[in-house]
Image (cartoon, rainbow, N blue to C red):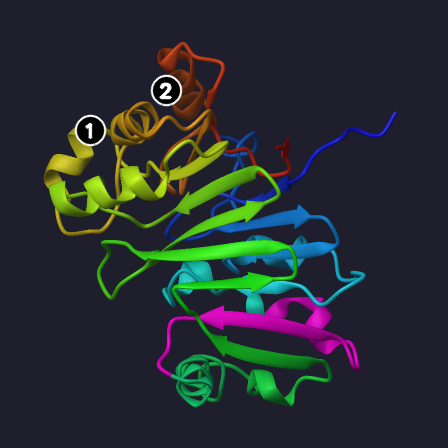
Amino acid sequence: MMQEYNMRLAILGARGSIPVSGTQQTRFGGSTSCYMVEAGDETVFLDAGSGLVSAPVQFEKPPAILLSHLHLDHLLGLGMYPRLSESGAVTRVYLRAASTEEAKERLAGIFAPPYWPLPLTDYKGSLELEPLRESFRVGSVLIECMEGRHPGGCEIFRLSCNDKRLVYATDYEPDEASFSRLITFSRDVDLLLYDAQYTAEEAETKKGFGHSTAEKGIELMERSGAKSLLLIHHSPHASDEELLRRERESGRENIRYAREGATIYI
């Protein structure tokens, strides 16, 4: 029997900072940030890290890729995504920019010689670049944006479809004012994806680096009324054993560390 759901989240990559591989990093995966949300006949990708390389290519409607920011670990997969090389295939990419022209210029500064063999606009597929707005729709999916707290800036996204909602808060370092806004932004969502790259001890020595902890994610879940918490952006140094230990210590079924290859139904 087909499972009924309003949203389906596929975890294609949950590692932070840089892709990793090794025998101690197989259960949670080594690909960097990329999450595929299917809602109705729409497909929305959250970031384009190295996990995007393994994403599906064929869709009923053109997929949308939301870029939280332009740090390389969140972009690594874009230039290698096979869909961009399929003649006539449309892919829409949204990023923070003042205009469509500025959006093109920002990506062209990364994907062009000498840093990349050719501009993304030279691929066989059709790449449509759009500036992020505070609120907009991709078909039946409502997307709302909140400015996060990270060096260079980072967007936090809320996706809503029918009566289901999720929030994606990656590369975020809380302070009192922004955390209060994020509590409101995350109010009663079904799933909260939250940056937990650092332990509480590590966070004390890495102030200003733009990342958070599981403890703050749990606080956010409790204060916002979010139903479940998925901890993301794993440190490249964290082993499977370490992440499993942290997950066990939470002692709650609705708190999990993201596993590459897993699927969550909402």
Residue 42 in the figure: left or right of residue 225: right
Q: Quadrant of residue 92?
A: bottom right
User: Neighbour class for label 1 at 10 Å: few (<14), some, many (≥20)?
Assistant: some
User: Does the magenta portion include 87?
Assistant: yes
Q: Which residue is mark 1?
A: 200
The disc label shown at residue 149, or none: none
61 or 120: nearer the viewer: 61
Q: Quadrant of residue 64?
A: bottom right
Query: Please, what is the three-letter code of the amino acid marked with disc 2?
Result: Arg
Residue 166 placement (x, y as % from top left): 49, 40
The residue beneath circle 2 is 246
Say if mark 1 contacts mark 2, CB within 8 Å: no
**Label 2: element kind:** helix
Q: Is residue 228 magenta?
A: no
Please tell me whether mark 1 sits on a helix, a strand or a loop. helix
Mark 2 closeness class: few <14, some 14–19, many ≥20 residues within 10 Å = some
User: Could you say where residue 81 lies in the image, as x and y percent from the top left?
Assistant: 65, 66
Considering every residue shown, the one lying at the far right of the view is 1
**Part of the protein shown in magenta:** 79-98
Q: Say whether residue 7 is visible.
A: yes
Residue 67: % across, % down: 46, 63
